[in-house]
Image (spheres, grey):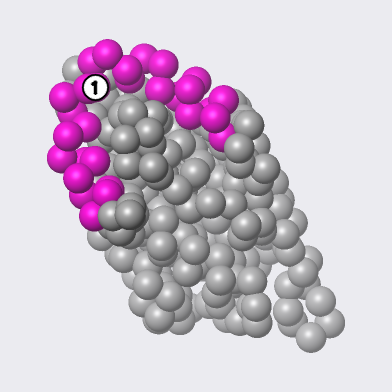
Amino acid sequence: MKAPLTRRLLIASAVLPAFARTAAAHMLEQVQNKLLNSEKYFQAADKDVPDFDLQDATGKEVKFSDFRGKVVVLHFVYTNCPDTCPLHAEKIAAIQHMVNITPMKAAVQFISITTDPKRDTGKVLMDFGENHGLDPVNWTFLTAKPGQPEGITRDLAQAYGVEFKIMGNGDQMHGILTNVIDQKGRLRARFHSLRFDNLSLVLFANALVNIASEQHERPVAGIWGKIDGWFGL
């Protein structure tokens, strides 16, 4: 019988650094090829992402460049969404939990951006994050700064690959997309819909962390190709 996933991740994170030197160079290619063959909602990418200059729920100015050096998991939601946005947030929270029980915790940043800055005030954003299980230790909720056009984050969402359109009742029609961006600010993967396997995104993020760790000759967060086989992930 397989051990619970949380226990397997903890065991894996304890033994991973010993295997870093021999496997890190090929990790990203291996994981990407595996996901292309097994994860139908995965799309590989390699291009610069649109920059932004927004603010967080406390009113602090935040630019995308502030997150250089970390793998970024980024998605767009709005808190009055009646269906998919809460589910998307909870899926991201589950992925964040999987990441945060490993050494990847310090290397991965989660970002949610609201497409409804007029209604999504700072307190609303913080309450939404707390209610859906997002951990502020490496997660931030972003919105428009005072004076910016109300549609700035919807335009940003479109630039990242998903469009939000305001309907007559104030709801927004939109797609569902989760972006994974590397430490240099390049989009490396898109996970479509809510149907992708959470572990697929964790594996891909870990591969990106692994590459950067090898380049800087530091212990890495994991060699998931080996762990995948050992623990039946």
For the question of whether residue 164 can be seen, the reply is yes
Q: Where is residue 188 in the image (x, y as percent from the top left)?
A: 54, 32
In this view of the protein, can residue 216 be seen by the observer? no
Toward the viewer: 173 or 199?
A: 199
* Amino acid type of the residue that numbered disc 1 sits on in the rendered structure: Ala
Whether the magenta-drawn stretch holds residue 71 is answered as no
> Which residue: 53% across, 61% down?
113
Q: Residue at x 31, y 35 (%)?
A: 230
Does residue 11 belong to the magenta stretch?
Answer: yes
Crowding at mark 1 (Cα within 10 Å: few <14, some 14-19, many 20+): many
User: Is residue 183 rendered to the left or right of residue 34?
Assistant: left
Q: Identify the image quadrant of residue 23.
A: top left
For residue 17, above or below residue 73: above
Q: Where is residue 205 drawn, in percent x and y?
A: 41, 39
Residue at point 28%, 33% (across, down): 222
Q: From the viewer's side, name the closer residue of 92 and 81.
A: 92
Image location (x, y in percent) of residue 231: 32, 42
Residue of label 1: 20
Image position, residue 1 (x, y; %): 33, 54
Residue 155, picture quadrant:
bottom right
Predominant SS of the magenta segment: helix
Where on the picture, by quarter, is residue 111?
bottom left
Residue sitting at the far bottom: 169
Q: Nearer the viewer, residue 88 or 164?
A: 88
Q: Quadrant of the C terminus?
A: top left
- Give the residue at the far right of this rendering: 168
Which residue is rendered at x = 22% and y = 22% of the image? 19
In the image, the segment drawn in magenta is 7-35
Decide: is 76 above or below 67: below
**Circle 1: element type:** helix
Q: In this view, does 159 lie to the left or right of 68?
A: right
